[in-house]
Image: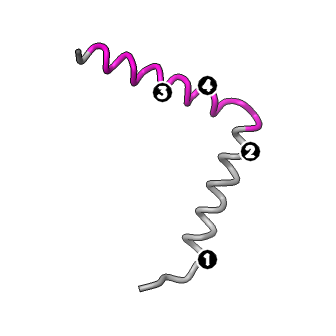
Amino acid sequence: MKIMRSAALLGVAKKVYDEARKPHNQAKIKSAVDQVKSRRSGGTKKH
């Protein structure tokens, strides 16, 4: 059963990788990363 699970995870990882290589998805990823970075560096910490 471990082989089936590994194969399924490999399939999902390949799909994610293929989608991330597309130019329009790269723009979305870059935008999301920039947004997170700006929140972490410029935001105020709430306690």
Q: Where is 8 relative to 21, above or below?
A: above
Task: Tell me the tag on residue 18.
Answer: 4
- Secondary structure beneath dot 4 equals helix
Give the image's coloring scheme: one colour
**Residue 35 locus on image (x, y percent):** 65, 62
Quarter in which the N terminus is drawn = top left
> Residue 2 is drawn in which quadrant?
top left
Residue 22 in magenta? yes
Magenta range is 3-24
Q: Which image quadrant is residue 37 in?
A: bottom right
Identify the main secondary structure in magenta.
helix
Identify residue type, mark 2.
Answer: Ala
Q: Residue 14 in the image: x percent, y percent?
A: 52, 22
Viewport quadrant of the C terminus: bottom left
Q: Are marks 3 and 1 in contact (CB under 8 Å)?
A: no
Q: CA distance from mark 1 to mark 2?
A: 22 Å
Spatial CA span between label 2 and label 4:
14 Å
Point 63% across, 68% down: residue = 38
- For this orientation, the residue located farthest to the left is 1
Residue tagged 2: 27
Residue 20 found in image quarter: top right
Front tag of 3 and 1? 3
Q: Position of residue 43 (x, y in %)?
A: 58, 78
User: Badge 4, how many Cα within 10 Å: few under 14, some, many 20+?
Assistant: few
C-alpha distance separating marks 3 and 2: 20 Å
In depth, the one of 37 and 32 nearer the eye is: 32
Amino acid type, callout 4? Asp
Q: CA distance from mark 3 to mark 4?
A: 9 Å
- Which residue is denoted by mark 3 in the rendering? 13
